[in-house]
Amino acid sequence: MSSQIDHLLEETRRFAPSAEFAAQAVATADLYEQAAADREGFWAAQARALHWHTPFTEVLDWSNPPFARWFGDGELNVAYNCLDRHVEAGNGDRVALLWEGEPGDSRAVTYAELTEEVKRVANVLIGLGVAAGDRVAIYLPMIPEAVAAMLACARIGAVHSVVFGGFSADSLRSRIDDAGAKVVITADGGHRKGKVSALKPAVDLALGDRGGLGPQQTVEHVLVVRRGGNEVDWTPGRDLWWHDVVPAASAEHEAAAFPAEQPLFILYTSGTTGSPKGILHTSGGYLTQCTFTHRNVFDLRPETDVFWCTADIGWVTGHSYVVYGPLANGATQVLYEGTPDTPHPGRWWEIVQKYGVTILYTAPTAIRSFMKIGRKIPRRFDLSSLRLLGSVGEPINPEAWMWYRRIIGGKTTPIVDTWWQTETGAIMVSALPGVTETKPGSAQVPLPGISVDVVDEDGTHVGNGNGGLLVITEPWPSMLRGIWGDPERFVATYWEKFQRLGYYFAGDGARLDRDGDVWFLGRVDDVMNVSGHRLSTTEIESALVGNEAVAEAAVVGASDETTGQAVVAFVIVKESYLAEHSPEGLAGSLRLWVGEQIGPIARPRDVYIVGELPKTRSGKIMRRLLRDVAEGRDIGDTTTLADAAVMNVISAQVR
């Protein structure tokens, strides 16, 4: 099958940075020239912005691809770079975390306070027998203790494995077993959607006999934060209350130096074989790229900005742009425990107004959910503090991009649409806000020091105006160092397809526009083959969201006797549209609309109007389940859905 992905949707709107923004921007165009002239020298210069206990002399060792070593003879401490050095520079009183609990309780934690807490937690972990290289599982809500737990592991050279607090006991058990965790750090519960979501009971289940596996063998202690106030069972000798042991621990702890390639964390992603993949990241290269990208992509001014990345720490975005990037840069940031619509649909905008948030980084899914509710909610709040907006997680539809700019950004705020993955560790493709003329829906250009290409099945460059497979052609500092315990799977999953060329294959489709800018087209698995044409779900979804009635859309290819595959669309209608129009006949109108916007070949065979879409807990649409519905099959595994009941509702609507 050809890897060429047909391009049908044309976007012509352009937004150059204002002269005022460009004149004061942190990142300037000469970064591209520096990186192009000497790529390794460029990354060495970025790394030297960190504190190295032992300075490195070697930048990149690529002698055993795909196993990279960055700054391999250098030594540093990640937590020292995120905490101590700011306190020693006289910034201990600067607020690190502006924490907002879902019920409305709040705390401001300074760099000095966070440093002291991390030192105490580090001493507690050492007292529990945790040493450098040991693994610690973290299963916590979005509370300051979660950040402290991650940094305490980094401080003593332990490897953390954060598991999203919405995952089940079985998911938690599989991750604890794979990592061989020695300690679990959890909470009694956390606040979510107006009630307490229990966490400690799931840990107890995970550590018990699951499905005949027998009791979990490696975990020796469970450290528990009291947050939800819910009743929990207790295992004396194993379980410890955070509030009993952490305040009692010494606040004296010297951060030791560790090699740049010291493992920092394992983060599990879903695997196609059913077993989760433990993506391994190390210290020096990862922190270098997180720090550089956070400062330059978000135009960060740590003395005055209030940064808010809305991701949970259970995902890589929370690792890189809630914990490591912002704290390494000495930023002040918002940390929010709850969901965007609790206790009311304007909760996020209330927080932006309360804290004077200047930089907001969120997902297209969230933006489209706000579009569904309408502009009247955000317009109740003062959002004038916002000076930069970011998007992450999946390609953003041009109309969602425009809504974000107009309604949240007041028609002037620059948007950086970022592409990266758990595996890449940090942002790879993005506009630089003071340099790039932005295009709604395009991530646009690889960052300085990053090399990507769009190629066909043979690895040949497709040329401007064409689509194909997105590859990374040169090693980068924050790249994954492997899959935990499975180097063969690491090679087979990411490198085998283009092993001859040494390219990393991301699994994403992309196209290059006539300027050579990158437009992401979603996972290659989601590309449809309609009458011999390879069509991107992303482009058809973008066309649907461009209709005044539609807030969100998901498109799948379903088997069709005539065309091979047919386009089937599931759409959510805006509340503002339904207030003034009947949905009757809308499905037919949307079929015609897509044909008019991008051509008859892309016209959906079926359009279903639905109330919700099946999404994972990180907000990604599970098109596999929609494909099951469209083809009349029994629905597959729904365990990773945020709300499993959604599929029952959709199935009933389709029938």
Image (cartoon, rainbow, N blue to C red):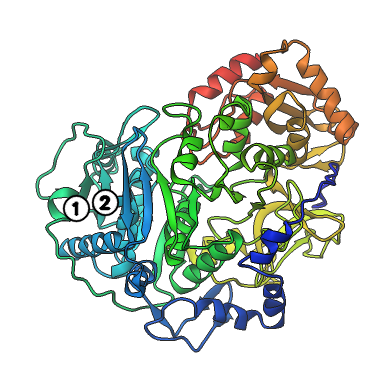
Q: Residue at x 66, y 70 (%)?
A: 448
Q: Residue at x 17, y 61 (%)?
A: 128
Can residue 238 be seen?
no
Say which element carries label 2.
Answer: strand
Looking at the picture, tell me which residue is in the foreground, 20 or 587.
20
Say which element carries label 1.
Answer: strand
Circle 2 crowding by C-alpha within 10 Å: few under 14, some 14–19, many from 20: many
Between discs 1 and 2, the one toward the N terminus: 2
For residue 221, which numbered disc appears in the image? Answer: 1
Image coordinates of residue 312 in percent, x first then y, are: 44, 46
Question: Above or below — where is 615 with respect to 59?
Answer: above
Q: In which quarter of the view is residue 569 placed?
A: top right
Can residue 228 be seen?
yes
Looking at the picture, tell me which residue is in the foreground, 270 or 318.
318
In the rendered structure, which amino acid carries the disc numbered 2?
Val
Question: Above or below — where is 26 with respect to 348?
Answer: below
Image coordinates of residue 630 in percent, x first then y, are: 68, 25
Looking at the picture, tell me which residue is in the foreground, 571 or 80.
80
Q: In which quarter of the view is residue 230 placed?
A: top left
Q: Give the residue number, with chain letter if any, for mark 2.
A: 184
Q: Residue at x 55, y 76 (%)?
A: 46
Circle 1 crowding by C-alpha within 10 Å: few under 14, some 14–19, many from 20: many
Contact? badges 1 and 2 (CB < 8 Å) = yes
Q: In which quarter of the view is residue 429 placed?
A: bottom right
In the rendered structure, which amino acid carries the disc numbered 1?
His
* Disc 1/disc 2 C-alpha distance (Å): 7 Å
